[in-house]
Image (cartoon, rainbow, N blue to C red):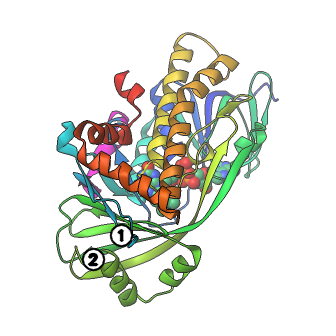
Amino acid sequence: MNDALPVYDALVVGGGPAGLTAAIALAEAGARTALLARRAPYADNRTTALLGESIGLLERLGVWRRCSDKSAALHTMRLVDDTGRLIRAPEVRFESGEIGLEQFGFNIDNRSLIAALEERAAELSGLTRIDADAASIEPEDASVGVRTTTGQSLAARLVIGADGRHSVCREAAGITVRRRELNQSALTFNIAHKRPHKNISTEFHTPEGPCVFVPLPGDRCSIVWVSSPAEAARLIALSDDELAEAAEKRSHSIFGRVRVEPGRNLFPLAIERPGQYAKHRVVLVGESAHVLPPIGAQGLNMGLRDAADIADIVGKTISAGEDPGAPQVLVRYQSARRSDVMSRTFAIDIANRSLLSDLLPVQSLRAAGLHLIGSIGPLRRLAMREGLAPSWRRAG
Ligand SMILES: Cc1cc2nc3c(=O)[nH]c(=O)nc-3n(C[C@H](O)[C@H](O)[C@H](O)COP(=O)(O)OP(=O)(O)OC[C@H]3O[C@@H](n4cnc5c(N)ncnc54)[C@H](O)[C@@H]3O)c2cc1C
């Protein structure tokens, strides 16, 4: 390594929502931070349901006030069994008031969220932005050397791999990943509709996966429609009027007449689990650390908890005058994130499998489980709280 190079405390690779949040949180925690991320217009029309503590984190980081007017509050979550099967689950309604909250969270389009994160990141003097991709990453004993696609050399004591599914950071650290394709695709698009959504998110469960209508500001919703890849390919090829008709039918006309807004995207679904979350001075945050199907809106909410945890751990380490890339720091991060990520990946996988299964015993179990959750208050409240954040975090 070149001795003349400045050595950052933390170098974040990747400028998606998880990477931007991690970079801001690290700089706020007192780490000399660099963000290596190419500036590019956000490429899809996805929205994110930000739940519970995600909003608190974005408020503390000075981000939420810049984009909250683009979001819609989520007061009620409705699960509707639309499988048409012999054994069906009863409808379950989760009301935020039942656990003393005004709302579970807010749904916001990713473009507005990213714009607010970019704006906040640009204000921080402890955060250096490098407008390029990482070409190579070489963990060494005392630091990590990074070469950018524009030929610049960088060094940091800790690298935060926020570079998504095909993470070069993960590969450079020698972390292997287990990937399972789900033979399902999610179609995303937004609609304007005649009747108000009343801040209710409605999830229709079909034998091919859930189709969720999530409130946006005004009389608008974002839709995540999970189906077989063949059905998703058919839906995305429909004209606006045909897709509006299909969405109206899928929603049982609860929103009245539907108009499809411009922009549609398809996401093939998979589950990815890396063997570790930290190794050789590299930690993983966001989709480099976990890929899940979009059920229960957990993906980015977990990614934001990754960002909050690494910033907290690094902040304390630097205050104590210690090395932020030292093995004990990586162990602390690994143990902070492991149970949250593993338990949620497991729960979502089971929920998805139980929906797709043609086996009567599995369908009965699913129906019975939802019946219990729907009818037993303490169980329902536990499910709601657990959906927002793991219990051990709330206690802490
Ligand atoms: C249909 C759908 C709906 C979803 N809905 C929700 C929801 O409601 N709530 C929720 O919490 N989650 C949701 N998720 C999950 C959420 O979208 C993801 O968890 C989140 O977008 C991941 O963000 P990220 O920053 O980790 O990754 P990405 O957004 O993939 O960002 C990675 C970034 O790294 C960059 N990069 C890659 N390689 C390099 C390199 N070599 N050098 C530098 N940069 C690099 C890429 O350009 C990219 O900008 C949903 C997902 C899907 C598919």
Q: Quadrant of residue 82?
A: bottom left
Q: Amino acid at mark 1?
A: Asp
Does the rendering let one see residue 16? no
Q: In x, y percent, where is residue 75?
A: 22, 51
The quarter in which the N terminus is drawn is: top right
Circle 2 sits on which residue?
Answer: 252
Q: In x, y percent, where is residue 273?
A: 64, 44
Q: Please give the range of residues in magenta.
A: 57-74
Q: Residue at x 43, y 44 (%)?
A: 301
Taking the view exactly as shown, the residue that stands out farthest to the front is: 361
Q: Quadrant of residue 59?
A: top left
Position of residue 122 relative to residue 315, above or below, is: below
Q: Residue at x 76, y 27 (%)?
A: 4
Q: Quadrant of residue 214?
A: bottom left
Compare residues 374 and 169 and report the one nearer the observer. 374
Instruction: Say the numbered circle drawn on residue 109.
Output: none
Find numbered disc 2 in the image and state the secondary structure of the residue it sits on: loop
Upstream in sequence: badge 1 or badge 2: 1
Position of residue 257 relative to residue 1, above or below, is: below
Q: Residue 82: say if magenta.
A: no
Q: Residue 66: say if magenta.
A: yes
Give neighbour class at mark 2: few <14, some 14-19, many 20+ (Cα, 10 Å): few
Position of residue 58 relative to residue 242, above or below, is: above
Circle 1 sits on which residue?
Answer: 82
Taking the view exactly as shown, the residue that stands out farthest to the top is: 320
The quarter in which the C terminus is drawn is: top left
Find numbered disc 1 in the image and state the secondary structure of the residue it sits on: loop
Q: Are marks 1 and 2 in contact (CB under 8 Å)?
A: yes
